[in-house]
Image (cartoon, rainbow, N blue to C red):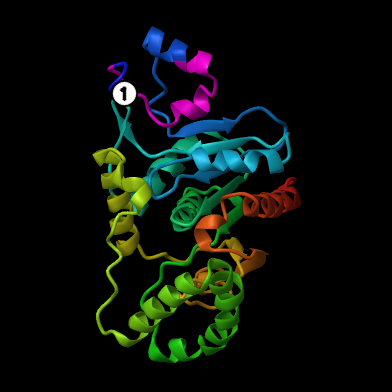
Amino acid sequence: QMEFGKNLPLTSLLERPTIAELAQLLENGESSAQESGIVAIRGGGNKPPLFVVHSITGSLLFWQRFLKDLDPDQPVFGLRPPEAGGIMQPFEGIEVLASRFADQLVASYKDGAFRLAGYSFGGPLAYEVARQLHQRGRSVALLAIVDAYARIEKRSRTDSFRLIPSVLVNVWYWLIDDMIPSGPRSALRHFVRFTRECLSRRPVDRETTPKNLQKKPAYLRAVRQSGKQIMRRYRCKPFDGAVTLLRNRLQSWKRIQRPDYGWGNLVPRVNVRIVTFCRHYQMVKEPHVRQIAAALQEELDAVENV
């Protein structure tokens, strides 16, 4: 915008991946199809398409890292958040986003079962899209949730006691996967934060903006903040489907859960696959993203004829 006086949506980088195509877009004043929330990350191919949802910042670009380890014949389409004049708008609610995506999917694809995937923030969002598709009479062949917890009501004290085995198991994983690789200073900081979290009656402040977002435009910071707010309010509702959970071996000490991350409370079938050994945010980076992509393709191939 500062250089050319034009606002282009981030999805222009998906639709026009070369410098020549972006230059043509700027020169001709063309714009993306703003009415559509579906954007091609990789079009073509004869396999049933995979639909992926955006991150807490509204980005779909990280899904490009999956492409080289997915089948070349596998189409991938992204569900993007609403924009106005090329500027992403703060999110109104998980149910609102999901309803918009479900309507557009039903309108654009008249037949067949859908395949959905979401990572982190996108996991509950993909779940809500699947639930609303089911309400509209459409089937979901695959709902792949990558390392995301079910958003359910606060657990009871009895449920908390049932998590003791998970805590005991994860103590070793925190040590092996996290603390030792990160060095003694980082390990000490982790230990102090964990101890404060356990002993303090007040929640630890998590409203700080990550350093990589502090210099971003104000609207992107506003989008991320709205994402945190709507996810805090959202509670998943049950539906008669299945969840495939592609998860990390290392659970966050902030949100220790059962092995199925709580999805078993909502759906009759949960397929849990532990595919990586790293921190949560590293899962969509090399080399761990390769393992996620390979597992995702296996699950897609397993339901290809549905």
The amino acid beneath tag 1 is Asn
Q: Is residue 70 magenta?
A: no
Residue at (41, 64) in percent of width and height: 236
The magenta stretch is 5-22
> Can residue 129 be seen in the rendering of this structure?
yes
- Residue 222 position in % (x across, y down): 26, 46
Residue 71: quadrant of the picture: top right
Does 238 sit left or right of 180 as displayed?
Answer: left
Position of residue 261 in the picture relative to residue 207 (left or right): right
Q: Residue furthest top?
A: 28
- As rendered, which of 204 and 32 lies closer to the eye? 204
The quadrant of the image that shows the N terminus is top left
Q: Look at the numbered disc 1 and give the secondary structure of its residue.
A: loop
Indicate the position of residue 282 as horizontal and vertical percent values. Answer: 55, 56
Examine the rendered structure and indicate whether residue 295 appears above or below residue 155.
Answer: above
The percent position of residue 24, horizontal first and vertical second, equals: 46, 10
The reply, left or right, for residue 245 in relation to residue 304 is left
| Residue bearing the label numbered 1 | 7
Q: Is residue 17 above or below residue 201?
A: above
Residue 67 location (% of width, % of height): 65, 39
User: In screen coordinates, is 47 left or right of 219?
Assistant: right
46 vs 148: above or below? above
